[in-house]
Amino acid sequence: MSQMDTLLDKGKQALGWVDERFPLTSLYKAHLSEYYAPKNFNFWYFFGSLALLVLVNQIVTGIFLVMHYKPDAALNAAGVPVAFASVEYIMRDVPGGWIIRYLHSTGASAFFIVVYLHMFRGLLYGSYRKPRELVWLFGIAIFLCLMGEAFFGYLLPWGQMSGWGAQVIVNLFAAIPVIGPDLSIFIRGDFVVSDATLNRFFAFHVIAIPLVLLGLVTAHLIALHEVGSNNPDGVEIKKKKDTNGIPLDGIPFHPYYTVKDGFVAVVFLMVFSVVVFFAPEGGGYFLEYNNFVPYDALQTPPHIAPVWYFTPFYSILRATTSNFMWVLGALALIVGGLTVVSTKSKNVKALAVGVTAILLAGFALLDAKVWGVVLMGGSVMLFGLLPWLDQSPVKSVRYKGVLYASVLSVFVVAFVLLGILGTKAPGYAFFGLIPGEPVAAVCSVLYLAFFAFMPWYSRMDATKPEPERVTWK
Amino acid sequence: MSNDKLEVSGGASFSCNCADSSRRQLMAATAAVGGAVGVGVAAPFVASFLPSERAKAAGAPVEVDLSGLQPGEMKTVEWRGKPVWIVRRTPEMLESLKKSEAMLADPGSSRAEQPDYVKGAGRAIKDEYLVCVGLCTHLGCSPSAKFKPGAESGIGDDWPGGFLCPCHGSRFDLAGRVFKSMPAPDNLPIPPHTYVSDTRLIIGEDTKGA
Ligand code: HEM
Ligand code: FES
């Protein structure tokens, strides 16, 4: 036996020793070397693994930031809040501190870019449809956690945007009837945003939410590997298998997609580095300028807006004024009416009438402020209903008709416009001509309509027949 | 090592009737007690979210010296972590309160949070001094002073002078009264306050001097 062979043999023995105690080889096979993914993945399928990469970046840079950061709102000898000063200290005095911080702050925006594209892929190819409902729902839960994580994290530098952003968002909860005011005190742990708030947000940001997030990502991937990935054609590769039970259109994840994802990761890191080194503040969108001023509880900065990734939902909140309630009422009536006409089931009819009546009563009785909060949260949750709203016989936009393609395009435009408007001060007008408020109202309606009318337009759409097998050029 | 591992086959184990009924009852009772204990244990964790005794005790009254404040000027002090404004109103500013009346949501301050001893349009003990909590009743930003009336303010020709909230654009007049159809539903709150002398004011206490 050559020395090489003995070494290989030793390695095999060691692996055998582990396998008797832990399913290492079988896990490796089940999830990598014998996990068959469709061979026709395209650009849109990069973002899942990129999200994992960014998640790791956030966790690693986060751990190193916590080594120097101090969650303390008290003033130091120089009269600066300790938390704010500790971030300045990381930026100026800790060796390598600035790059670690910029990796983390830019990473937050990158995370949302990647996740928004990842979700959009779902809308394109119907990835949320049966049997991937749970993959999708775990995804929504991840998205909600991500929003929470970003919101809690934004308070930590204790700048003007941190403090006033938290003030506004926590006060949203005060709009809830009866329990609202106490709830907002409960969240802050004080009557104003204070040291107590900072410390609990710190606890949520560094441990509570990340733990939940990791659990959810694991569940997301377990569910995905149970049912297998969808693909740009939206046809199930598991329907056509060879004699060994391997999908004809499947290729093993490793080495094919590990190499591909590795390449994409390198390209992503190149783009990411350019931003980190040359535009870490993202023109005031990734790190807002007012946040370089310590929090002053006595003075709100002249312009406050949430970070860009929250702005579409924030715009919907702002658009919900007392006049907008009429539009919402009309929308509820139409959807309720449509449901009643188009279903045969007595129970569903009764349910539709009941829900519409409750909504209309609610719109009339409760403040627009309350509905703004409900709509802001609800507009995120609506994504969770997609698996049941979409009634199209096909999954992928490739075989859906022009109707869905147009509706989806309108939705994307509305979403982007809402996002842009959310970064602007009230009274903003596009090119100084087109006032922002009515545009935001129209876009909010379009956003809601995308979901509300899906059961109907997805059925009306002139779909094309799906191919038997995936298409591959 | 024995090989007699229990064969449990997925869903079947849930419907298995193998345990006798007395054991099942015991199991249910144990689970119920366990659940109750769980709720009990959760209580202190939930309670720890409430404001601490220290947070509740904070908020001692603050004393303000008004001697340096010129007519038309404003001073901000911190009381219970919140900004409290003191505006020394000029006769023209007081006059503007009449002009704004028609544009207000609650000119009589019937819904407003304010002590009984501040009355009338001025919402003050002494009309010359407006004392109010400078936090918007919408979502709690601190409005900015826009005292200059008219077009010069950038708000509009009919602007009587007052405050503009930077967050969602709510407007308030020089008595902290909110304009009609603004995101903010109510007038700015007036804190309890009292004058201990002509130029010394205590915020957070309403025992009238003596
Ligand atoms: C921390 C955030 C997330 C991570 C790390 C993550 C990770 C992944 C990975 C690695 C994949 C397989 C590769 C791919 O299809 O791109 C995947 C698939 C998927 N993800 Fe996510 N994901 C995240 C968030 C989300 C969110 C927010 C949603 C939607 C609300 C979502 C919905 C889906 C769906 C539907 C699939 C299957 C796609 C298909 O088969 O066509 N994920 N995810
Ligand atoms: S907080 Fe003042 S208008 Fe919203």
Image (cartoon, coloured by chain):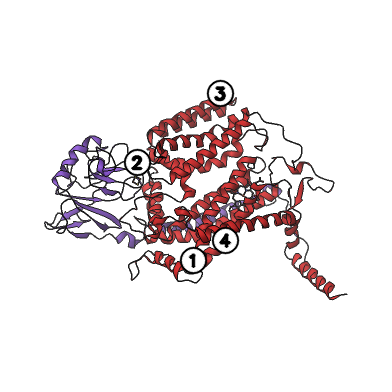
Q: Is residue A25 shown left or right of residue A374?
A: right
For ligand 1, tell me if the residue under mark 4 lies within 8 Å: no
Q: Which chain is red?
A: A
Q: Is residue B69 shown left or right of residue A85?
A: left
Q: Which residue is mark 3?
A: A341
Q: The residue tagged with tag 3: helix, strand or loop? A: helix
Upstream in the sequence, badge 4 or badge 3? 4
Q: Residue at x 73, y 66 (%)?
A: A21
Q: The residue tagged with tag 2: helix, strand or loop? A: loop
Circles 1 and 2 on the same chain: no
Q: Which residue is mark 4?
A: A57
Asked if the residue under mark 4 is in contact with the one under mark 1, i.e. CB atoms within 8 Å, the reply is no
Q: Chain of mark 3?
A: A
Q: Is residue A237 shown left or right of residue A353?
A: right
Measure how far apart labels 1 and 2 are at the Cα level. 40 Å
Q: Which-is-in-front pick, marks 4 and 3?
A: 4
- Residue closer to the observer: A123 or A387: A123
Question: Which amino acid type is marked by label 4?
Answer: Asn
